[in-house]
Amino acid sequence: MKGGVYIDPEAAHLVTRQWAVVNVKRGSRKRFPETCVEPMPSAEAALAHADPASHRHAAEVMGPSRSSEGVRLYYLVRWLDPA
């Protein structure tokens, strides 16, 4: 699957869908290094901690997943805050 995340059914607990605040300028990027992602306990918490003016956006992400370069990445499922 190009540009996606493979989910191993025997290790589904390793890469999970979760809420987060992503510290990036919004654009066409669909994956982010873990240094840009702050996991949150709920969608409400992610929205409360978001600050689009400071490039902190609430999102639903999958991760972390290790890339072929050894970097831990999160993949965008959807943005929670308006653009």
Image: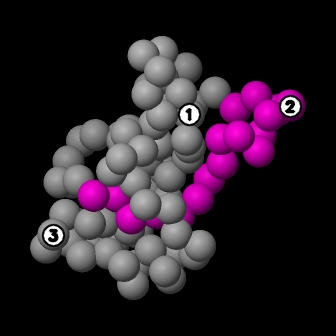
The part of the chain drawn in magenta is 7-23
Task: Tell me which numbered mark, 3 or 2, is placed earlier along the sequence.
Answer: 2
> Looking at the image, can residue 79 be seen?
no
Residue denoted by label 2: 10
> What's the residue type where badge 1 is placed?
Ser
| Real-space CA distance between mark 3 and mark 2, rounded to the nearest whole angstrom | 39 Å
Name the residue beneath numbered marker 3.
54
Say if residue 31 shows up in the picture.
yes
Q: Residue at x 52, y 75 (%)?
A: 43
Sequence-earlier tag: 1 or 3: 3
Q: Residue 42 lies in what quarter of the image?
A: bottom right
Would you say the residues marked 1 and 3 are in contact, meaning their CB atoms lie under 8 Å apart? Answer: no
| Quadrant of image for the C terminus | bottom left
For mark 3, does the 10 Å Cα neighbourhood hold few (<14), some (14 to 19), or many (20 or more) residues? few
Mark 2 secondary-structure assignment: helix
Q: Quadrant of residue 9?
A: top right
Q: Position of residue 79 (x, y in %)?
A: 38, 61
Classify residue 28 as left or right of residue 11: left
- In the rendered structure, the answer to whether residue 29 lies left or right of residue 68 reads left
Give the number of the disc on residue 65: 1
Residue 22 forms part of the magenta stretch: yes
Percent of width and height locating residue 29: 28, 40
Identify the residue at image location x=30%, y=66%: 57
Q: CA distance from mark 1 to mark 3?
A: 26 Å
- Looking at the rendered structure, the secondary structure element under dot 1 is strand
Task: Report the quarter where the N terminus lies.
Answer: top right
Please state the horizontal and vertical placement of residue 5, each as a whole percent of the image. 57, 31
Type of residue at label 3? Ser
Crowd around label 1: few <14 · some 14–19 · many ≥20 (10 Å): many
Q: Earlier in the sequence, mark 1 or mark 2?
A: 2
